[in-house]
């Protein structure tokens, strides 16, 4: 199921509109977390969304952050760990009237060359795909459990964060490296 959160533009006041959502309170946020899990990343605990939608008719700015913990597998030691993530959101939302992009596009791009701009039509704004995109952007490609993770011994497969293995200390060439390999297998 695709999560959606359609915000009626008529209910927004001019200027800043604070928007806060949480997986504890809103079903659509839980659906969002479930769709992230379906893509392979489990969201641990609460998913919090804290946004400000600034109404500058006809266009909008969406700023804020998404907070959650993602279950990750360390690229070095292969252990699962919770990775706390705060992903900032800063988007320009250009309201496309049925006639086309026209002036709203010009206005936003003048103000904000660096800003990522999304276009939307109609009298509702669906926040869910915007937040979903921010979540997917925030998930690291090659996470490590901590900056000094020692990883796994290539020789014996021990997790070196738990305990140093005997093959780790000696790295001499030739005969001695064979010897350390031997030690590794025997101490398993
Ligand atoms: Zn690790
Ligand atoms: Zn080892």
Image: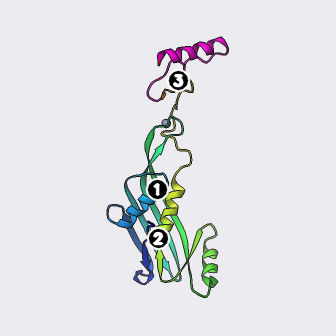
- Residue at 46 percent across and 70 percent down: it is 127
- Tag 2 near tag 3, CB within 8 Å: no
Q: Residue furthest left?
A: 25
The first of marks 3 and 1 along the sequence is 1
Assess disc 1: are there few (<14), some (14-19) or many (≥20) residues with their C-alpha within 10 Å of its C-alpha: few
The first of marks 1 and 2 along the sequence is 1
Question: Does the magenta run of residues contain 156?
Answer: no
Any atom of ligand 2 within 8 Å of the CB at mark 3?
Answer: yes
Query: In this rendering, is residue 92 above or below 83?
Result: below
Tell me the residue that label 2 is attached to: 127
Image location (x, y in percent) of residue 169:
55, 18
Tell me the residue that label 1 is attached to: 38
Q: Residue furthest bottom?
A: 99
Q: How is the image coloured?
A: rainbow
Image location (x, y in percent) of residue 66:
44, 60
Assess disc 3: are there few (<14), some (14-19) or many (≥20) residues with their C-alpha within 10 Å of its C-alpha: some
Tell me the residue that label 3 is attached to: 156
The first of marks 2 and 3 along the sequence is 2
């Amino acid at each position: 199921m695709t999560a959606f959160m359609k915000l009626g533009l008529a209910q927004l006041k001019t200027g800043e509109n604070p928007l806060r959502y949480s997986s504890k309170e809103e079903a659509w946020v839980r659906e969002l977390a479930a769709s992230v899990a379906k893509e392979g990343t489990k969201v641990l605990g609460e998913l919090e969304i804290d946004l400000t939608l600034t109404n500058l008719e006809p266009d909008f700015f969406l700023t804020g952050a998404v907070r959650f913990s993602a279950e990750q597998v360390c690229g070095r030691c292969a252990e699962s760990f919770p990775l706390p993530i705060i992903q900032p959101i800063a988007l320009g939302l250009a309201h496309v009237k049925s006639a086309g992009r026209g002036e709203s596009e010009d206005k936003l791009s003048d103000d904000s060359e660096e800003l990522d701009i999304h276009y939307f039509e109609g009298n509702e704004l669906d926040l869910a795909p915007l937040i979903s995109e921010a979540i997917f952007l925030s998930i690291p490609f090659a996470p490590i459990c901590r900056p000094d993770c020692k990883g796994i011994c290539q020789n014996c497969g021990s997790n070196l964060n738990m305990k140093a293995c005997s093959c780790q200390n000696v790295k001499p060439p030739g005969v001695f490296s064979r010897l350390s390999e031997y030690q590794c297998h025997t101490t398993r």
